[in-house]
Amino acid sequence: MTHIFSTSITPTSHQLIERFGKPEYQGQVIEAWLFDDQEHRLQTEAILLSLGVKAKIRCAYKPLLHFFLEDIDILSNHIKRIEVHYPLHDKSSEKRFLLETYPLSALVGKAKIHFVANPKSMDAYEVILRSSTGIQTQYKVFAPNHLHLDLIGQTHLSPTGWIKVTNAEGKIASNERLVTDYESLFSVGMEAVSKHQWQDREPYFEELNIQIFLPWKEQSLDYNHEVISLSEALHEDFYFSLQEWFKVKAGHLPNDREGQPGQIVPEIQHTEDKNLSIKIETRPYQVQDTEGQQILKTANTPISMKQVEVELGEITGDTFTAKTVTGRTIHARYHKGTDFPVMISGGQHANETTGVVGALRAAQTLNEQGGSHFTISPLENPDGYALHQRLITDNPYHMHHAARYTALGDDLEYRVKGSLFEKEIRHKAREISQAQLHINLHGYPSHEWTRPLSGYVPHGFDMWTIPKGFFLILRHSADEKWSAYAEEFIHLVTLKLIKVPGVLAFNKEQVELYKKHAGETDFRIINSFPCLVSYGKPEDIPIQLITEYPDETLYGDGFITGHNIQTATVLAAYEVHQILSSKE
C-alpha cells in the first residue's frame, strides 16, 4: 500500500461567509453559484442575512433544473405552457445544454414544455411561462461554465462556480468565476496522480483507491430513478478522467478500451463533517467473494458470485474455464445438442447486472429443451463483479463504472495482445461450439450519467447519458449473406419481444423523453425497439446480439423486470437463429 496524496478542503460556502459577512457588505447583494445541496445553500444565505448581507446562493450543477425545483411552483401558478430557449456554445456539443435540462419535461405535470435552441446565448437559458389565465412571465437563468484543458489536452466546457456582487447603488462590483471546493477537490486529486512517479509500463498498480468524503446529500427527483448526486458524478469524473490519463501515458488514445492501468476505484461517501476530504493510495487487489442465495426467477438484487456458480451447476454439459489476473475463475458450460449452436454470455461489464441473471435463467430453460446446443458464460468479468458488490454496500444506487472493466482496467472484448485472461473464455466457447451467433447481455444507466467537471457529457459515451428504453445492438459480418440475415433476424426477434408485458410502453416513454432532451435519435426503431445495426470487427463472430437494458442501480421489481426481458431476449434470439439457420 502506497500513500500518494491526502488533504481536506474548507467548503466554499464558509469562505463566502468569511469574505462577505462584514459590515462593509451590508446593503449589497451577493449572488453565488456553488455545487452545494439546497440545504447547505440555504444555510449560507441565512447566516449572511443574520450578518446584514442579502445573498442568493444557486446551484452551479444543472442550473435550469434547480431553478424549476426551487424557484417555480408550476401547479400553484397554473402554468400551461413552458418555453425553454437553451444556449449554444461553439466549443461544446449542440445538445450539451439541452441534455442538462433532463428530466425537466417529466417534472412539470400537465404543462406543455418546448425546447428551442438559442444561438444568441452561450451562457443562459431564457424561460417563458404562460399560465392558463394568459399571464406570461419571463426569466433568464444563468448557467456558469468555463472553457478549460484537462491534463491530456482535451478541451471541455464545464459547469463552474460564480460570484456576482451588486453594491448598494445597484452597480455590479464584481462578476467572475469562482473556483469551488468541488472543483478544487477534483483538480488537486488529478494533479496528485499525474505527478506521482509511476513505473514505466502497464499495469501501474493493482488498485488505485480514491477515497472522498463530501458533506452534501443526494436529492431524489420525482421521476423513475433520477437523482441529483454530486457524489456519483464525482465517481464518474475521477474514474474516467484517470482512465484517460493513464491511457495517454501508456501511448493509447483516450477512448481506447485496451489500456491496462489497473483497477481504479473512487469511493465517494457522505460525511457530517463540514470539510471535503480526499485520500489517494495504491492497494493490493481484494479477492474476497460474495455469498448468498435468492430464488433466481424472482431475484430482486444482483445475485452473489457464489450463486452464479450454483446456478451454472444446474446446466448439464462440459465445464470449461479461464482465469483472471487476480486468480479468480470464469466458469462456463458447454451443453451439446443437435440444434445450431449459440454462445450466451453476461457480465462483460460487471456493473450491468440483469444480464447475469438473464443468461442463467435462459440457459436453464434451454437446458430442458431437447436438442438445445449452446455455451453459457454468465459472468465473464468476476473481478469487476466483486468490486461492484463491494461498492454497492455503501452506495447501492450509484452506477459504479469503476466496476465496468476488468481488474487490469480494460474492456475484455477489446483485449487483443498479451495474456488473454477473461477473453479466453470466448475463444474457448467459439472453438468448442462453432457457434455463429453470440448473445451478449449488457445494461446501461437507469438514470442520467454525467461528468460535470469534464464537459458534463461523458466523453465517448454520449449516446448513453440518459435512458432510452430496452436497446438492441446487432453487429454482423460485412458479408452480404450476414447483412441480409441480420435484418431478418432483428425483425423477427423484436416481433417476439413485443409480447413481453409492459416493454412497449416502457420503450415509448423513455424514447419520447430521450428525444426531448437529446434531440433527434441517431438509431432505428424496429417494431418499437430502439436498435443499432452495424458491421462488427472482421475477427468477430458473424452475428452478435448485444442487449442494453437500463439496469444500473435497479433493485426490486425493476430488477426483476430487467432480467425477465433479458431472459426473453435470449430465448427469442435462440429460436429465431434456429429458424433462419435451417433455411440455408
Image (cartoon, rainbow, N blue to C red):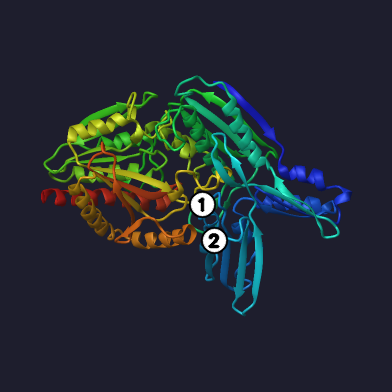
Mark 2 vs mark 1: give the one in front: 1
Check disc 1 and report the residue beneath it: 93
Disc with the residue nearer the chain's start (2 vs 1): 1
Q: Residue 446 location in percent, x, y?
A: 45, 51
Type of the residue with mark 1: Ser
Q: Residues within 10 Å of mark 2 (few under 14, many from 20)?
A: many
Q: Residue 141 location in percent, x, y?
A: 65, 60
Q: Residue 533 location in percent, x, y?
A: 30, 51
Type of the residue with mark 2: Leu
Q: Residue at x 30, y 48 (%)?
A: 534
Left or right: where does residue 168 sit relative to residue 204? right
Q: Residue at x 26, y 34 (%)?
A: 313
Q: Residue furthest right?
A: 23
- Tell me where residue 278 sits by quadrant: top right
- Tell me where residue 139 sits by quadrant: bottom right
Compared to 268, does 162 lie above or below? below
* Element at label 1: loop
Q: Residue 2 location in percent, x, y?
A: 56, 21
Check disc 2 and report the residue beneath it: 104
Left or right: where does residue 325 sit relative to residue 178? left
